[in-house]
């Protein structure tokens, strides 16, 4: 009798419960901190210092990052998409809104579901591509973090960047290498199929890395610019805070809607730039609220304009059998 399988099954719900409990605790801690000493009002005052023109420029620039992400999807699924950029943009906007609203990373499921509904892409294929997208995001943000993180020794910067680039280069090569996993048993055989699908995902996009770098360069520049205006400091001082916030946002355990972990990542990076923890948390929260409102607003607008599905229409159902 194999005792490991029941133990594993019992352990997984416990691990999920611990992650969710941690997420809720982090978020409640942030809310408790804000509820004390009228800090919500200070967050509103930070926005009041930004001119309408600057606010409009930040909003427009952030929307351009959505366009870059949509182009990335169009490139990855070009055979299925058939040049329907508007439909790709709608998928990205709704997916982005769901990520920011649904807790515990549940919003990620919107991406494969929408691709299945609109373009007929299989859930497994879309999920593998999403995994590769997220890995590319993590590598790019990691390299940027190594480049700009304050106080990091040059040797550690170089080592971190080299390690990330090496892993990013190795993963697709490993996935494409011939393997005999199909004949090693049921579990390994299934993993082999996933590896083959992941191989397809890593090789489909022609300009995937370029879209990823362009998206994150603009996104972090916009966030750094807004954070600098919220703090009343220079872009060079605020930019590491934007990188720290996004680096924290890709961690496997998050606060509800990212609240708590996002702000902590930004404030921790800003400490090295001489920004007090209290000021860093307040500015990061204001930045986070702006990004959240932008995501929800654009996602809601996209939801109002449904895309025509490329799936064949199902025949009308006949009368129910008695």
Image (cartoon, rainbow, N blue to C red):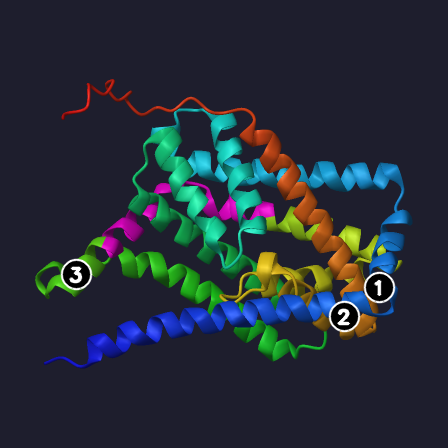
Decide which of tag 1 and tag 3 comes sooner along the chain. 1
Q: Nearer the viewer, residue 6 or 159?
A: 6
**Which circle marks residue 69 in the picture?**
none
Discs 1, 2 touching: Cβ within 8 Å: yes
Dot 2: what SS? helix
**Residue 178 visible:** no
SS for callout 3: loop
Q: Residues within 10 Å of mark 3 (few under 14, many from 20)?
A: few
Q: Which residue is mark 1?
A: 39
Circle 2 residue: 33
Q: Could you tell me which residue is drawn at 31 percent across and 25 percent down?
A: 311
Which sits in the foreground, 115 or 68? 115
Which mark is drawn over residue 179? 3
Q: Position of residue 236 (x, y in %)?
A: 79, 61
Residue at the (78%, 51%) spot, across then down? 225
User: At which x and y percent is residue 253?
Assistant: 52, 67
Mark 1 → mark 2, Cα distance in angstroms: 8 Å
State the extent of the magenta-drawn residues as a range.
194-215
Please report the residue visible at 25 percent of the width from the left and 18 percent of the height from the top: 316
Give above or below for 113 relative to 233.
above
Q: Earlier in the sequence, mark 3 or mark 2?
A: 2
Q: Left or right: where does residue 265 sit relative to residue 1?
A: right
Tag 3 and tag 2, C-beta contact below 8 Å: no
Examine the structure image and report whether residue 224 is included in the region drawn in magenta: no
Task: Indicate whether residue 198 is drawn in magenta.
Answer: yes
The label nearer to you, 1 versus 3, is 1
Any part of residue 267 in sight? yes
Q: Earlier in the sequence, mark 1 or mark 2?
A: 2
Q: Quadrant of the C terminus?
A: top left
């Amino acid at each position: 009798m194999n005792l490991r399988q029941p133990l594993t099954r019992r352990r997984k719900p416990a691990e999920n419960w611990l992650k969710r409990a941690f997420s809720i605790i982090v978020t409640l801690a942030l809310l408790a901190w804000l509820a004390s000493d009228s800090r919500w009002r200070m967050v509103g005052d930070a926005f009041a210092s930004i001119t309408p023109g600057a606010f409009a420029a930040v909003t427009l620039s952030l929307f351009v990052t959505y366009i870059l992400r949509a182009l990335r999807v169009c490139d990855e699924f070009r055979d299925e998409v058939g040049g329907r950029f508007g439909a790709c943009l709608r998928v990205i906007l709704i997916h982005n809104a769901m990520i920011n609203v649904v807790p515990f990373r549940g919003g990620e499921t919107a991406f494969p579901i929408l691709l299945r509904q609109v373009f007929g892409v299989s859930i497994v294929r879309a999920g593998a591509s999403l995994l590769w997208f997220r890995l590319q995001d993590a590598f790019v943000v990691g390299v940027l973090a190594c480049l700009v993180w304050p106080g990091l020794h040059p040797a550690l910067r170089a080592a971190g960047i080299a390690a990330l680039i090496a892993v990013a280069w190795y993963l697709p090569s490993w996935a494409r290498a011939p393997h005999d996993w199909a004949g090693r048993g049921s579990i390994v055989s299934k993993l082999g199929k996933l590896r083959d699908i992941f191989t397809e995902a890593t090789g489909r996009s022609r300009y995937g890395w370029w879209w990823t770098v362009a998206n994150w360069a603009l996104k972090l520049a916009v966030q750094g610019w807004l954070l600098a205006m919220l703090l009343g400091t220079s872009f060079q001082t605020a930019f590491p805070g934007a990188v720290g916030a996004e680096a924290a946002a890709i961690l496997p355990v998050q606060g509800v809607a990212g609240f708590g972990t996002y702000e902590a990542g930004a404030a921790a990076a800003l400490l090295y730039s001489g920004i007090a923890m209290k000021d860093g948390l307040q500015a990061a929260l204001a930045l986070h609220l702006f990004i959240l409102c932008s995501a929800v607003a654009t996602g809601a607008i996209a939801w109002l304009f449904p895309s025509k599905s490329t799936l064949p229409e199902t025949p009308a159902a006949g009368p129910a059998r008695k």
